[in-house]
Image (spheres, helix red, strand yellow):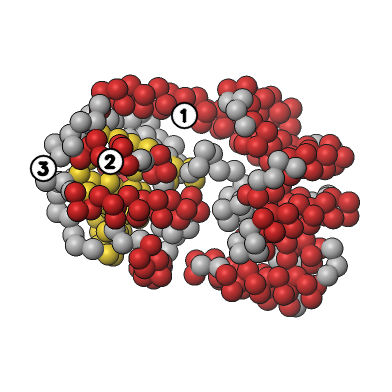
Amino acid sequence: MKTSSGFGVLVLAASLMLTATAEAKLTIGDPAPPLQPGKWIQGDAVPGFDTNHIYIVEFWATWCGPCRAAIPHLNELYEKFKDHGLIAIGQDVSEQNEDGVAPFVNKMGTNMTYRVALDDKSQNPKGAMATTWMEAADQHGIPTAFIVNRHGVIAWIGHPMGLTEPVIGQILADKFDTDSFAKKYEKDQLVAKQRNALYQKLRTAMKSKDWDAADAALAEMEKAEPENASRQWGPMRLQILLGRKDYAGAYKLAESLSDEGVAGLQNELAWTLATTKGVDQRGLILAEKIANHANQAANEQQPQYLDTVARLQFMNGRTNEAVATEQKAVDLAPAEMKNYLNKFLTDYQQGKLPDMNE
């Protein structure tokens, strides 16, 4: 199943969650671990850290929607500060197909000009960088960026979209208040652990279809993060209502959430309704209406939104429209999306609804 970014049902914060590990062994103020890439895809190799530069080491993967969304921001920072001593490294990890990384980077062209490296999996299938950096720092989601200062010390860890020009400038000038940031980071990590514990409780309840427990866990999460609670957790509440077979309540919630006008949220709501067994014709008509709102907001330029519209057109009995819409999605899709969208297109052409469990 997919979200507005193309993959997965739930995206926590703005990152895709990886496997959780034990307590952090690497944090702000610690010496940076050595760089252990397996292969440099783009740019000169960086053998180690020196006092003439600061380094952004950003962990990402081609399949990760939030990672792709962060690339232009990171590239803009790199281009602005590269002549002042900034080296940026896009460290690929948890890649589903490493053969696709180089073509992806080549296609990005001037939008991704910083160094890119694959992980070294010769001794560890998880990857040396994934283990000694991400796992050691108790970081479970990508994209995640580390900044190493001129002293070889980790000065900053976080989502790359949180990186600003003042932060880069202060670290370059050796004037960044690492101690203050370390305190904030520690507090944020504690909040993240609490959030992750609640999420695990919710996921367990959802998997076992214990809707009462799922509802209680979700209420805890909404209470812990009241800002934008409906937008952030609305899709999960929709799934709970659908699980309870409270279709009237589900449709009412979906319509209410759609009225907030957020295209990504609208696409996720429509996709959830389109792929849940038991949704009747009323729900499918509503889902197509919501999907069209998302697609129109994106000027029909987002392949994942077009894909959602195509599925609902087919389910609502308009096969020819579904084929035409899916073809648009294929034409607009990046390389890593084309294969599965082409499969969907073939299914529609053959008069079949794509099976999302295949």
| Residue at figure coordinates x 68%, y 70% from the top left | 326
The kind of residue on which mark 1 rests is: Ala
Name the residue carrying label 3.
51
Check whether the beta carbons of the residues at disc 1 and disc 2 lie within 8 A of each other. no
Name the residue carrying label 2.
168
Relative to 171, is 97 on the left or the right?
right
Relative to 341, is 348 on the left or the right?
right
Residue nearest the observer in this picture, 266 or 62? 266
The kind of residue on which mark 2 rests is: Ile
Tell which circle, 2 or 3, labels the residue nearer the N-terminal end. Answer: 3
User: Regarding mark 1 in the picture, which secondary structure is present there?
Assistant: helix
- Viewer-nearest of labels 3 and 1? 3
Across and down, in percent, residue 18 comes to 46, 44
| Residue at figure coordinates x 35%, y 40% from the top left | 164
- Viewer-nearest of labels 1 and 2? 2
How far is disc 3 from disc 1 in space, using C-alphas? 33 Å
Tell which circle, 1 or 2, labels the residue nearer the N-terminal end. Answer: 2
